[in-house]
């Protein structure tokens, strides 16, 4: 198999040629020649290697709203890169063709894009930033770190679209070079995370998201894909909404998105729009100022209205975005703070 091996940054050597990977919360202990849970890190002769460095599965120029990020450089184009593999095994995965694989195989359409080329491509396509998206960025952590450093030197913004399962030390390693943390909070119970993603330490996701905001001053937006019978109960939705309010702040955008049958969840129906609207109401009732229903083209909650004066601030229809009422992060009509980031893509270090 023709893949590039790159020594991992965050691991410990253990007795008997074993290693412990400290990139994500699995903290896999890996024996000689074995792979971690994500299948993208391998123990070779007592050292840990990433098998996926610079091996892109997907490359596109996207509107930033597609991530979705609604309060971050609205209307901008972002150079979007996906790799291979994942540390979760979600039953509803929308990108399972690239996430549920063992290693990057050239025959599958892998394309090598070194960090310098990624930055050059982003600039040549007039993108304002780079996003690591489509699959979990953690799984090619060293590549995203090298790329993020170069992106910041070139005044591009940087985005992780993530399940949020990084360790605090991995976050602290890449934190100085990341501007936005678009994190999934898939539900709010042990049962949900175990059944949907086969993950138990899900509460660490919340701690790391808070750390991204507090310690590294990242812009944070949260997505919950609402799946009928899995996470559409009031208890979980209220739990997520109140956690966001209390830990990330009432101005943090919460995207409640529509599930469509996919992968191993073909037996469930698409989420009724009324369920999304109920989740929207729960978010608003909890005090969140910006709740958006996603995957429902034309829905009235697509646009942003000022939480103070009610004027239209950003008009959205599908991926057509028009900024009408922003002055920096504030409403240009009444001056209210709306938690938008529209500048500061230049190099940001702690
Ligand atoms: S990144 Fe992969 S190998 Fe490392 S701890 Fe996570 S799942 Fe395990």
Image: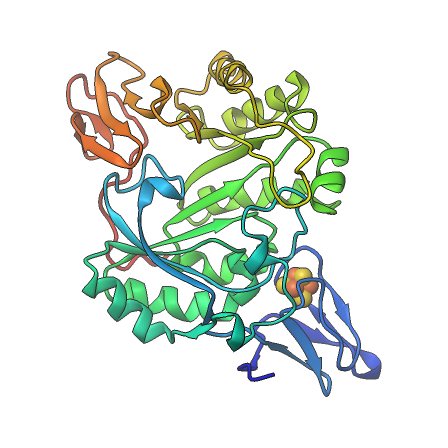
Farthest right residue in view: 16
> Left of 131 or right of it: where is 136?
right
Give whichever of 308, 284 is nearer the camera. Answer: 284
Above or below residue 267? Residue 200 is below
User: At 64% from the left edge and 72% from the top edge, which residue is drawn?
Assistant: 41
In x, y percent, where is residue 22? Answer: 65, 64
Q: Is residue 210 among what the camera can see? A: no
Give whichever of 198, 200 is nearer the camera. Answer: 198
User: At 25% from the left edge and 49% from the top edge, which residue is drawn?
Assistant: 77
In x, y percent, where is residue 65? Answer: 33, 39
**Rendered-image quadrant of the N terminus:** bottom right
**Rendered-image quadrant of the C terminus:** bottom left
User: At 40% from the left edge and 44% from the top edge, which residue is drawn?
Assistant: 67
Above or below residue 30? Residue 261 is above
> Left of 47 or right of it: where is 341?
left
Task: State the count of labels.
Answer: 0
Above or below residue 331? Residue 186 is below
Give whichever of 216, 126 is nearer the camera. Answer: 126
Q: How is the image coloured?
A: rainbow
> Left of 268 or right of it: where is 64?
left
User: At 46% from the left edge and 15% from the top edge, which residue is drawn?
Assistant: 284
Question: Which quadrant of the render holds ligand 1?
Answer: bottom right
In x, y percent, where is residue 197? Answer: 69, 45
In x, y percent, where is residue 167? Answer: 61, 56
- The quadrant in which residue 54 appears is bottom left
- The quadrant in which residue 75 appears is top left
Above or below residue 250? Residue 178 is below
- The quadrant in which residue 3 appears is bottom right
Farthest bottom residue in view: 45
Q: Is residue 120 among what the camera can see? A: yes
């Amino acid at each position: 198999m023709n893949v590039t091996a790159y020594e991992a940054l965050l691991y410990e050597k253990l007795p008997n040629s074993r290693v412990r990977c400290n990139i994500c919360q699995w903290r896999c202990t890996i024996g000689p020649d074995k792979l971690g849970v994500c299948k993208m890190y391998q123990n070779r002769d007592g050292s840990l290697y990433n098998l996926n460095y610079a091996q892109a599965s997907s490359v596109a120029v996207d509107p930033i709203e597609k991530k979705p990020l609604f309060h971050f450089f609205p209307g901008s184009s972002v150079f979007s890169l996906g790799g291979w593999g994942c540390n979760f095994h979600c039953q509803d995965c929308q990108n399972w063709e690239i996430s549920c694989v063992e290693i990057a195989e050239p025959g599958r359409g892998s394309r090598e894009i070194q960090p310098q080329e990624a930055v050059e491509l982003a600039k040549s396509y007039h993108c304002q930033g780079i996003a690591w998206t489509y699959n979990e960025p953690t799984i090619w952590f060293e590549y995203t770190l090298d790329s993020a450093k170069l992106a910041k030197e070139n005044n591009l913004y940087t985005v992780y679209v993530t399940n949020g399962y990084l360790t605090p030390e991995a976050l602290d390693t890449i934190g100085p070079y990341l501007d936005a943390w678009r994190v999934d909070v898939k539900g709010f119970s042990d049962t949900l995370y175990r059944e949907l993603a086969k993950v138990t330490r899900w509460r660490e996701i919340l701690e790391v998201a808070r750390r991204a905001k507090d310690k590294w001053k990242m812009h944070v937006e949260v997505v919950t894909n609402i799946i009928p019978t899995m996470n559409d109960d009031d208890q979980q939705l209220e739990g997520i909404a109140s956690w966001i309010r209390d830990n990330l702040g009432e101005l943090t955008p919460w995207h409640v998105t529509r599930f469509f049958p996919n992968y191993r969840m073909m037996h469930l129906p698409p989420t009724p729009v009324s369920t999304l609207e109920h989740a929207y109401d729960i978010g608003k009732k909890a005090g969140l100022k910006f709740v958006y229903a996603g995957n429902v083209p034309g829905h009235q909650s697509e646009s942003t209205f000022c939480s103070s004066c009610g004027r239209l601030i950003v008009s959205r229809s599908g991926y057509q975005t028009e900024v009408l009422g922003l002055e920096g992060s504030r409403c240009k009509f009444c001056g209210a703070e709306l938690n938008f980031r529209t500048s500061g893509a230049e190099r940001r270090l702690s």
